[in-house]
Amino acid sequence: MRALVLLFVLLVVPAAAGAQEGRASGPVIPKGKGTQCVAETDYMRRFHMIELTHQRDETVHRGIRTERYSLKECVECHASVGTDGTPISINAPGQFCASCHDYAAVTIDCFQCHASKPDGSDQAGLARSLAVAAGMETVR
Amino acid sequence: MSEFDWKRRHFMSAAAAAAGVVLAPGVTLYGIAAKAREADVPVTSETRWGLLIDVNRCSDGCDACVSACNEENGIEGHGRPATDAQWIRKVQLRDPRTGIEKHFPVMCQHCAEPPCVDVCPTGASFKRADGIVLVDKHICIGCRYCMMACPYKARSFIHENVSEQRPYAPRGKGTVESCTMCVHRVDAGAVPACVEACGERGNGAMLFGDLNDPDSEISQRIATYATRRIRADLGVDPGVWYQNL
């Protein structure tokens, strides 16, 4: 009996450990800012492309610029910063978008046109313009 | 104009841009997007955005609007003028008989009846409800029919790979693009970059506003002064108006 238990341990435990290693060899995804994405992680993994496509049409054609499913906001939260402090392209190997898409062998075209790094400078410029506009509004 | 006057004029326009005061009675030339929309509210045809350019105020050699546009939208040339993208350009007109010269910017005229939209085979070229004519680059196949159809030579084709785009102004090879009237700024309640730059660094020749609102400054000026639009005879109803042209 003891021999049987020993045999079981010898056979099964390494197999289970192997399975754990197999899972660990999936994509390693850098963590984004904050604690939770704009929807449940499972939902985002399965349906982010549908939400992005929907949002893109809403933004381009109807001028709806809500942040929830905006690609710009994806990049804001999920792009990593390098050791030298400069942002890394979210589409670079090993980064948020590329790590999964490379693993799944799905090519994405987003970043042929869209910026793949967050840009703080535009926010400052626009905020300044808005302040000027607001100042003029109060004067008028 | 003397050097002193020139500086004073710049000082005046800078002061006007900062404080929003009227330059002189009836000649405030700096518009604002009065109605900032909520982010989740779609644009409607109640508004029609337009521009008024006072050609007399626009001077030769000033390219504040052009450089501001390039900076805002991340447009960089490759030193190849024939194919480099150009959203706004300065045009010089000279009457050969009298020799009088006029300088003014020309960009997408944001027509109410845009020929570029008529010819687009995919629906990529479209007019937004508030009158801004855009290219949906997700749908654009780069056929360039719209470039042929545009009477104002306003559109450019992107021939080369683009990198370091602005997050709010996506651009990519194989699509057609043109002036968006800085739609990202307009949606946030600001004025286009060219108008802002013209007020701050240029001569305050450009005014942005709602053509559908009879009380807006742009409508008031169009109702008060003689204005014209380029090739109005084509019947495309441009949204860019020129004064003193």
Image (spheres, coloured by chain):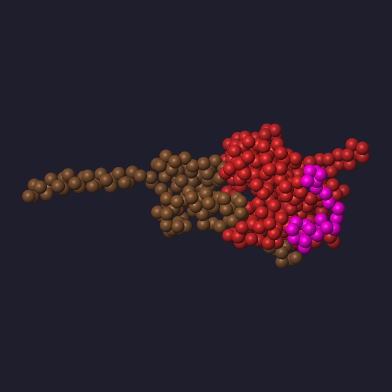
- Residue drawn at the location 84% of the way across and 43% of the way down: B102
Viewer-proximal residue among B15 and A28: A28
Quadrant in which residue B136 is drawn:
top right
Identify the residue shown where x is 71% and y is 45%.
Answer: B114
Q: Position of residue B208 (x, y in %)?
A: 74, 55
Residue B83 image offset from top left, x and y in percent: 67, 34
The answer to whether residue A76 is visible is: no
Residue lying furthest left: A1
Q: Is residue B100 left or right of residue B154?
A: right
Q: Is residue B34 above or below residue B244?
A: below
Magenta stretch: give its range: B211-235
Horizontal side, residue B223 vs residue A21: left or right: right
Residue A116, percent from left and from top: 53, 46
Q: Which tint was used for chain B?
A: red
Taking the spot 59% from the left edge, 38% from the top edge, the residue there is: B141
Percent coordinates x, y for residue B185 in the rendering: 65, 54
Please check the rendered image and state whether residue B219 is part of the magenta-colored stretch, yes or no: yes
Total marks in image: 0
Residue located 78% across and 46% down the image: B235
Instruction: Looking at the picture, tell me which residue is in the foreground, B127 or B26.
Output: B127
Magenta stretch holds residue B23 = no
The answer to whether residue B49 shows anywhere in this view is yes
The hue used for chain A is brown
The residue closer to the viewer here, B35 or A123, is: B35
